[in-house]
Image: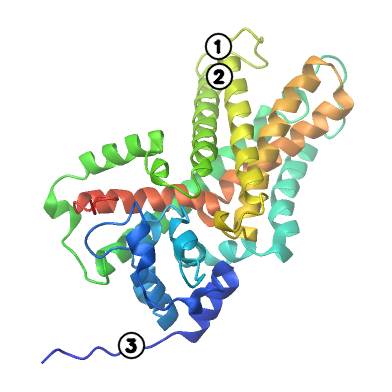
Amino acid sequence: MAQATLAEPDLQFIKEVKAGGGETLKKCFQCATCSVVCNLSAKDRPFPRKEMMWAQWGLKDRLAHDPDVWLCHQCNDCSKYCPRGAKPGDVLAALRHISVQQNAFPQFVGRMVNNFRFLPVAFGIPILLFLLLMMASGTLQIPDGEIIYRKFIPQWPVIDVIFPLTAIWTLLCSAIGVRRLWAGFREGGFGGKPMENPSAAGSLIKPILATIFSILKHDKFKECVVNRARYLAHLNMLWGFILLAITTTCVAAGVYVFGQQTPYSLGNPIKWVANIGAIVLIIGSLLAISHRLSGDEDVGKATYFDWLFLLVVLFTGISGLLTQILRLANIPGVAYPLYFIHLIFVWFLFAYLPFSKFAHLLYRTTALVYARGMGRELGGRS
């Protein structure tokens, strides 16, 4: 005789899922159409049918430990063909949002970043930090002469203090969040059944490398049918960030290793990489925003969690590009304040990475590595 399992529904969790964009959850009647039409769902223990069932039952802990929540790329093929309009894509997006908040460290920062009421506080923190250090440096006034941004926001102590400490903060919070997520995967496994330790199945080096190459190509997004346009938007934003990260690394090496100060000439290769990265990032964010504004129900519901990230990415790219144009046009009264605003957006984007939708990069990567380590390939049903 099969052993009975006691299910303890978390009614508050169900309310959270609905409030986070999954208000159609209760329309699901478990026909499994979603799992059938999904091109990414695995052959064994496919998603998102089981996730819909667990969410309806309020099984918060089981979903918190479910890697398949993160293996979903929100193609929304499932939502398109759902005969009941339950929109599994939106429900799983809500579950990922909840997962980010659950794994966040410290959690009060996650709550602050994801609540519109605290947006002034979230932006006020970096503004206050920058102003205090600029005041201590005596650089609050607009400098005379050629526009050189370090005369307004000096390398020391402003840049050399704020951004290294921010990097340490982001790495620490991200590492704790990923560790919590991984521990949950180890406990829950796929389909609510714990699986072997990934290390027992061999080294994680191959799964990590395979996952990185997959992400760089964004090949999983190519499997989407309904939301195929998301592929270009995500790919552009990814490579925009990569090119700008290369630029930042080169500039830092130039300043701290070779003593080469900015600004660089327009013919400098680093400047070319920076400009291309900014343009690609802007194009990607505009594509994502226009896709969200298209009014197409198959796109999926956009929440504050989505809009905050997309708008900050867009403003980061635009403000960065404009600071260069205004410097070349020699308009200091606008260039210097805009540079200040640009750095605020950069700080906001990365300091809150573990708590915003940007955390998808960390958590989905972790889930993909775990799945590959267990030999679970997406789209492996054929």
Q: Report the residue at 58% width, 48% height from top.
A: 351
The percent position of residue 105, horizontal first and vertical second, equals 49, 61
Q: Could you tell which of marks 2 and 3 lies nearer the N-terminus? A: 3
Whether label 1 touches label 3, CB < 8 Å:
no
The kind of residue on which mark 1 rests is: Pro
Question: Tag 3, which secondary structure?
Answer: loop
The percent position of residue 300, horizontal first and vertical second, equals 56, 58
Q: Is residue 265 above or below residue 217?
A: above
Q: Which residue is mark 1?
A: 269
Q: Report the residue at 63% width, 41% height from top.
A: 313
Which dot, 1 or 3, sits closer to the camera?
3
Q: Nearer the viewer, residue 175 or 28?
A: 28
Q: Which residue is mark 2?
A: 273
Q: In this image, 137 relative to 190: left or right?
A: right
**Number of residues whose C-alpha sits closer than 10 Å to that of mark 2, classed few (under 14), some (14–19) or many (20 or more):** some
Q: Nearer the viewer, residue 92 or 176?
A: 92
Question: Tag 2, which secondary structure?
Answer: helix
Q: In this image, 246 relative to 151: left or right?
A: left
The kind of residue on which mark 2 rests is: Val
Q: Could you tell which of marks 1 and 3 lies nearer the N-terminus? A: 3
Q: Dividing the image into 4 quarters, which one contains the N terminus?
A: bottom left
Residue 62 seen: yes
**Number of residues whose C-alpha sits closer than 10 Å to that of mark 3, classed few (under 14), some (14–19) or many (20 or more):** few
Q: Which residue is mark 3?
A: 7
* 3D distance between C-alphas at marks 1 and 2: 6 Å
* 3D distance between C-alphas at marks 1 and 3: 60 Å
Whether label 1 touches label 2, CB < 8 Å:
yes
